Amino acid sequence: MAQSLGQLFKNPTTRNVAIGVGVAVTVPLAIAFLAPYLRPAARSVVKAGLVAMEKGREIGAEIGEAMDDLVAEVREELRDEREAAAAVRAAADAGESET
């Protein structure tokens, strides 16, 4: 006895196999149809990513330069403070030795 199509798809196994076959046939057809449109879109995405990466490198280099300048300024300031403190101590030592 032949089963109607509706009764056949009530069985979960049969329904799942039919869905799998449909996907297996549809996906390659969709990819073949959309390939001419997807390639330029993919190129645009890769291009935007490369531009963003280059910009990020530039920003990183600028931040690195700014940090190097800041560190050099702080080292200079510390050196000046140490020299001033040493001069004060030397003057104090010289004043004590005279009295």
Image (cartoon, rainbow, N blue to C red):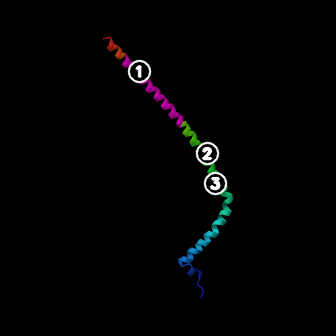
Residue lying at the far top in this picture: please name it: 98
Q: Magenta stretch: give its range.
A: 63-90
Where is residue 65, by image quadrant?
A: top right
Residue 92 vs 49, above or below: the answer is above
The picture places residue 45, in percent across and down from the top left corner, at 62, 51
Q: Classify mark 1: residues with Cα within 10 Å, few (<14), some (14-19) or many (20+).
A: few
Identity, as a three-letter code, of the amino acid under mark 1 = Ala
Quarter of the image where the N terminus is located = bottom right
Q: Report the residue marked by disc 3.
A: 42
Give the structural element (helix, strand or loop) at label 1: helix
The picture places residue 93, in percent across and down from the top left corner, at 35, 16
Give the structural element (helix, strand or loop) at label 3: helix
- Seen from the viewer's position, the closer of residues 99 and 58 is 99
The picture places residue 89, in percent across and down from the top left corner, at 36, 19
First in sequence: mark 2 or mark 3?
Answer: 3
Distance, label 2 to label 3, CA atoms, is: 14 Å
Comparing labels 1 and 3, the label whose residue is closer to the camera:
1
Indicate left or right for 51 with 79 as reference. right
Q: Report the residue marked by disc 1.
A: 84
